[in-house]
Every structure is written in structure tokens, then in C-alpha cells.
Image (cartoon, rainbow, N blue to C red):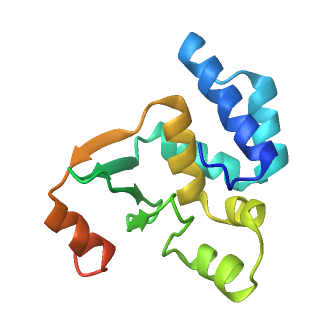
Amino acid sequence: MRSCLPTVAEQLFRDIQKTYQETSQIPDDLLIALKFVFGSCALQALDLVDQRSVTCLSSPSGRKAFQVMGGSGRLYTCFVSCHYCPCPAFAYTVLHRNEGLLSLFSQCKHILAAYLCQAMGVTQQESVSDQQMSMLLSGTAAL
């Protein structure tokens, strides 16, 4: 996980990773912790995880981006390395109100879903060329 995440979030993702690897389930106590830390967004993010809506795009140069199919059918390209999502909730919470990372996670279900998929090891994987990744990073292409 990322060292710039709040400690409570990092520990929660580690606990989910450990238990999910062992049991293929998230126990009730961790589900309650998710809801407590991230609010109602946790349930929305888990729904995206259940629907297999998260795809990790990776290029030969090692760059990664996550594409998350939102509930409305819109595809959002998220960058967990810099905690960015183009969704309206992210724009309002982080860019407009300038709130911290936990506020971001409690508002942006797409980034939270990407972190949960990584922790659970259920992210769909897709390889793209370095050129495709460059175009994606510059915002000129959707894959």
C-alpha cells in the first residue's frame, strides 16, 4: 500500500488483504470498520468490487492506472499513486473543498474500490502499451 495513506486506512487495507487471502471473505468486523472509517462510500465501493468494475491497466514501463466503471455506466480513470479521480465527488471534496485523504475516500467510491480490489487481489488486469498509457495519462484517450 501507499505510505502517504492515513495509518488507519493502511492498517485496514492490510487486515483486509491478510484475511481475504486466507478466507476469500471480508469478516463482519472489517466490514464494520470500513463503514466506520469511510462511511456510506464503503458500501458503494464494495458494490463496485462485487461487480468486478475495477481494471488495473499496466504498461511495460511499470506505470499503472485504474479504470472503474461507475454505477451510471461512466468509465473513470483513477490514479491511486496520486489519489486522483475525475468524478464529481472527487472534484468537490478534494479540489473545491481541499479536504484530506480520508475525506476523499469517504466521498470517492472509485478510488476506494481500486484500493479494496488491490487489497483483496481481485483487480482485473489489462496490459497496455507505453504509448497507450501516455495517451491515457495525458487525457487524450480512453481505453
Residue 101 position by quadrant: bottom right
Query: Which is nearer the eye, 29 or 5?
Result: 5
Q: Position of residue 30 (x, y in %)?
A: 76, 29
Q: What is the count of numbered marks? A: 0
For the point 69% across and 66% down, which residue is it?
104
Q: Is the residue 102 above or below the residue 58 in the image?
A: below
For the point 28% across and 50% down, which residue is it?
58
Q: Is residue 143 visible?
A: no
For the point 77% across and 75% down, which residue is it?
99
Q: From the image, which quarter does the C terminus lie in?
A: bottom left
Q: Position of residue 86 (x, y in %)?
A: 48, 75
Q: Is residue 52 visible?
A: yes
Residue most toward the top? Answer: 22
Q: Position of residue 16 (x, y in %)?
A: 65, 28
Residue 93 position by quadrant: bottom right
Q: From the image, which quarter does the N terminus lie in?
A: top right
Q: Is the residue 50 above or below the residue 76 in the image?
A: above
Query: Which is nearer the eye, 85 or 46?
Result: 85
For the point 65% across and 84% down, which residue is it?
95
Q: Is the residue 103 above or below the residue 126 in the image?
A: below
Residue 123 position by quadrant: top left
